[in-house]
Image (spheres, rainbow, N blue to C red):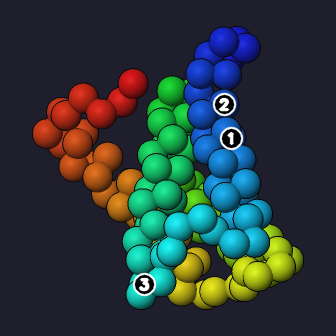
Amino acid sequence: MNIVKWTDSYLPPMLYALLIFLLSSKNHPSVDLSHGLDKGVHCVLYAGFGYLVLRAFRKSNRNRPANLLTVIIVILYGISDEFHQDLVPGRQFDVLDMVFDGLGGLLAVAFSSVADRYRWPIWF
């Protein structure tokens, strides 16, 4: 795989992971996410991450179980993010956040499967 193709495939999910890391590094989020809204944010953020990871696997044309690997990567990154947040003053480890991170990855895979079935042009 040449450098241009590698960059186009893998740089977007890496930058997105960096964005998640930076957002979870803030000790006082600027948006009030009380009343369970933070779970929805986790789900949506990690669905976006899952989409980009799945896109990377598809673009690399490797013979891998891309859907399963995508969900595993999203879940592992969600777990690592929760451990990271536990080290940030004012933040804490939350198992339910990890559940919604994983759910976001599953939604990305499910949506892409439906899109593929109906040939919706979601891949760029």
Residue flagged by tag 1: what amino acid is it?
Answer: Met
**Disc 3 or 1, which lies upstream in sequence?**
1
Task: Identify the residue at horizontal 40%, vertical 71% (top origin).
Answer: 40
In this rendering, would 112 be left or right of 72? left
Task: Give the residue pinned by disc 3.
Answer: 36
Within-10-Å neighbours for mark 3: few <14, some 14–19, many 20+: few
Residue flagged by tag 3: what amino acid is it?
Answer: Gly
In the picture, the disc for residue 11 is 2
**Contact between labelled residues 2 and 1, with CB atoms less than 8 Å apart:** yes
In this rendering, would 16 be left or right of 81? left
Q: In this view, does 6 lie above or below 78?
A: above
In the rendered image, is residue 80 in sight?
no
| Mark 3: secondary structure | loop
Q: How many angstroms separate mark 3 from mark 2 (CA)? A: 31 Å
Residue 104 percent across, percent down from the top left: 44, 64
In the rendered image, is residue 9 in sight?
yes
Residue 3 percent across, percent down from the top left: 73, 14
Residue flagged by tag 2: what amino acid is it?
Answer: Leu
Task: Give the residue pinned by disc 1.
Answer: 14
Image quarter in which the C terminus is found? top left
Q: Is residue 40 above or below residue 121?
A: below
Pick the residue in front: 66 or 3: 3
Within-10-Å neighbours for mark 1: few <14, some 14–19, many 20+: some
In this rendering, would 49 be left or right of 27? left
Q: Which of marks 3 and 2 is in front?
A: 3
Q: How many angstroms separate mark 1 from mark 2 (CA)? A: 5 Å
Image quarter in which the N terminus is found? top right
Task: Identify the residue at horizontal 38%, vertical 54% (top origin).
Answer: 109
Pick the residue in front: 66 or 37: 37
